[in-house]
Amino acid sequence: MNFQRYEQVSQAADLESLRRGLIDFANELDFGLVVGVLATGHRGPGGHTEFVSVGNTPEAFLAASRDPDNARRDPVHQRLMTQATPLIYDQSFYVAGGAGDLWEMQAPFGYRTGIAVALHMPGYRRLMLGMDRDRALPRHPVKLNRLIADLQLLAVHAQDAAARLLTGSAGSLPTLAPRQLEVLRLTMEGKSAWVVGNLLGISENTVNYHLKQIFRQLDVSTKHHAVLKALELGLL
């Protein structure tokens, strides 16, 4: 996959650009349908979850699927709420999940088989990204694993844009202290916390403390995501 396709998604300036980037990416992988859903929820009694989506879901299918009970019963949605690994699904998956009727409802709109992944983000947010098409996935394990890997990497690039654009949360840019930037630059080069500490003359625990502060300020949960977001924001 051309790296520019990933950048088209991660650097989308508005919702239409994000939508177009997701569709172009999916089409290049030979998938006709794609949707990204940002779920924002709260834990505990009385907590609720809000969903905002972007993609090319057919309008007729949207009109037929607005029943919230259907969303709660959807086995793909249920699995992605708790599962971090990619999910492959087809008619048999829906039937096994006791939702064969939901499959019958969506099949006429081009949904036959798909791959989906969810990324769990800080603040009880999740990005669920799925691609669907009207024929079976490749059986060759190398080709199938390549599709899954492309989708996972796309999700990493899409989650910042989704959080920024789908929630209207774009505002003042976060700032990092000089020491935090030094830690992040060395981390970007693939150096471990122990090596970073030796190079900067600080302990490994101090490096990990700086990384935790960076995660909090950038609203991310991994070193890889922190580097991507810092690059996107022009901090590195």
Image (cartoon, helix red, strand yellow):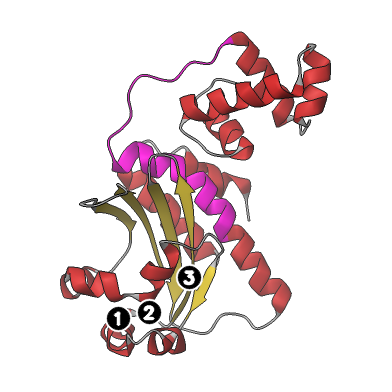
Q: Quadrant of residue 94?
A: bottom left
Labels 3, 2: front one:
2
Q: Quadrant of residue 91?
A: bottom left
Q: Of callouts 3 and 2, which one flags the residue occurring earlier in the amino acid sequence?
A: 3
Q: Nearer the viewer, residue 33 or 125?
A: 125
Q: Is residue 227 above or below residue 28?
A: above
* Residue 81 vertical placement versus 168 (above, below): below
- Between the residue at mark 3 and the residue at mark 1, the CA separation in whole angstroms equals 16 Å
Crowding near the residue tagged with mark 2, few <14, some 14–19, many ≥20 C-alpha atoms within 10 Å: many
Badge nearest the viewer, 3 or 1: 1
For marks 2 and 1, the one nearer the N-term is: 1
Q: Secondary structure at mark 1?
A: helix
Q: Residue at x 27, y 70 (%)?
A: 72
Q: Amino acid at mark 2?
A: Tyr
Q: Quadrant of the N terminus?
A: bottom right
Pointers 3 and 2 in contact (CB under 8 A)?
A: no
Q: Are dots 2 and 1 in contact, CB under 8 Å?
A: yes
Report, in whole angstroms, how far the alpha carbon at label 2 lies from the one at label 1: 6 Å
219 displayed left or right of 13: right
| Magenta residues (range) | 151-177
Q: Which mark is residue 31?
A: 3
Q: Position of residue 97 (x, y in %)?
A: 39, 84
Q: Using the image, determine if residue 78 lies above or below residue 102.
A: above
Q: Is residue 138 left or right of residue 191?
A: left
Query: Where, quadrant-wise, is the C terminus in this rendering?
Result: top right
Tag 1 residue: 106
Q: Which mark is residue 111?
A: 2
